[in-house]
Image (cartoon, coloured by chain):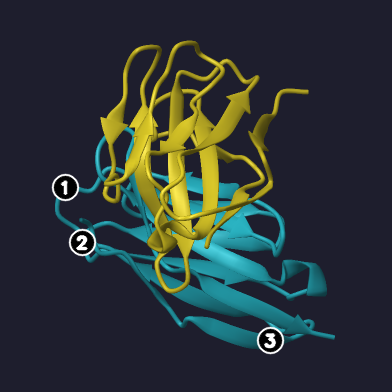
Chain colours: A yellow, B cyan
């Protein structure tokens, strides 16, 4: 069965370190998204990609970067981790326009920055 | 940033009772509305994608309606069961791909 996975599931890191969160999907979806979940805010979009070599900033992109070298993967990098980036991160993918296609979410990565 | 609001923030329902809650969004430049169900310790799962004014969608005991002219959608749960306990997220589409999520309504069904 097709799926979307994230790794690691839990991560503790120190302020200032670079951290990369992995997202891998086997749906063969062109569209991939990274969100963060914070209390009272729901899910907020960090970055998204419409296809290989395409990346775009979301509403909370400062301090984060992504790259898309193939269809299956969209790793999220925190360039220099800050305590404000402690959160739960969700990756999602969709097979077409979000006008008609739902997004499929990964299991999430809980990141703690100390 | 599109302001999507959900109310109430949380509600408790007795098993067997029906309930409903609201998602409101700016009605200008409407593209689509998504509903997701999010159980504790799991990831959000899609319930409905709605695009047309007057749309009604149903999945089992859960249904949703959409009013794009006034900017709201209702989600209904009929005959609530403990397995319906979850946070229900709505999200409005900003363009072809970007969703703006509300903070969710957390439903707790008491046996």
Badge 1 crowding class, 10 Å Cα cut-off, few under 14, some 14 to 19, many 20 or more, is few
Where residue B64 sits: x, y (%)?
51, 60
Which residue, given by chain and number where applicable, does mark 2 sit on? Answer: B26
Q: What is the secondary structure assignment of the residue under circle 3?
A: strand
Which residue, given by chain and number where applicable, does mark 1 sit on? Answer: B29
| Residue A34 visible in the picture | yes
Q: Are marks 1 and 2 on the same chain?
A: yes
* The one of A93 and B61 positioned closer to us in this rendering: A93
Which residue, given by chain and number where applicable, does mark 3 sit on? Answer: B13
Which chain does tag 3 point to?
B
CA separation, marks 1 and 3? 35 Å
Q: Are marks 3 and 2 in contact (CB under 8 Å)?
A: no
Q: Are marks 1 and 2 in contact (CB under 8 Å)?
A: yes
Q: Residue at x 44, y 35 (%)?
A: A77
Q: How many marks?
A: 3
Up/down of A104 relative to A90, above or below: above
Which chain does tag 2 point to?
B
């Amino acid at each position: 069965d097709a799926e979307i996975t994230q790794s690691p599931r839990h991560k503790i890191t120190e302020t200032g370190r670079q951290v990369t969160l992995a997202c891998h999907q086997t749906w063969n979806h062109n569209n991939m998204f990274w969100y963060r979940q914070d209390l009272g805010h729901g899910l907020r979009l960090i970055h998204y990609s419409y296809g290989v070599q395409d990346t775009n900033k979301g509403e909370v992109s400062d301090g984060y970067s992504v790259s898309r070298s193939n269809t299956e993967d969209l790793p999220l990098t925190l360039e220099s981790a800050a305590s404000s980036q402690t959160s739960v991160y969700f990756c999602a993918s969709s097979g077409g326009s979000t006008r008609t296609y739902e997004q499929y979410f990964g299991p999430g990565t809980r990141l703690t920055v100390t | 940033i599109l302001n999507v609001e959900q109310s109430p923030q949380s509600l408790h329902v007795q098993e067997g009772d029906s309930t409903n809650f609201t998602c409101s969004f700016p009605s200008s430049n409407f593209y689509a509305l998504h509903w997701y169900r999010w159980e504790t310790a799991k990831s959000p799962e899609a319930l409905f994608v709605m695009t047309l004014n007057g749309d009604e969608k149903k999945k089992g005991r859960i249904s949703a309606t959409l009013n794009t002219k006034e900017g709201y959608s209702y989600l209904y749960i009929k005959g609530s069961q403990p397995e319906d306990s979850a946070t229900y997220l709505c999200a409005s589409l900003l363009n072809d791909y970007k969703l703006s999520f509300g903070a969710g309504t957390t439903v707790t069904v008491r046996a």
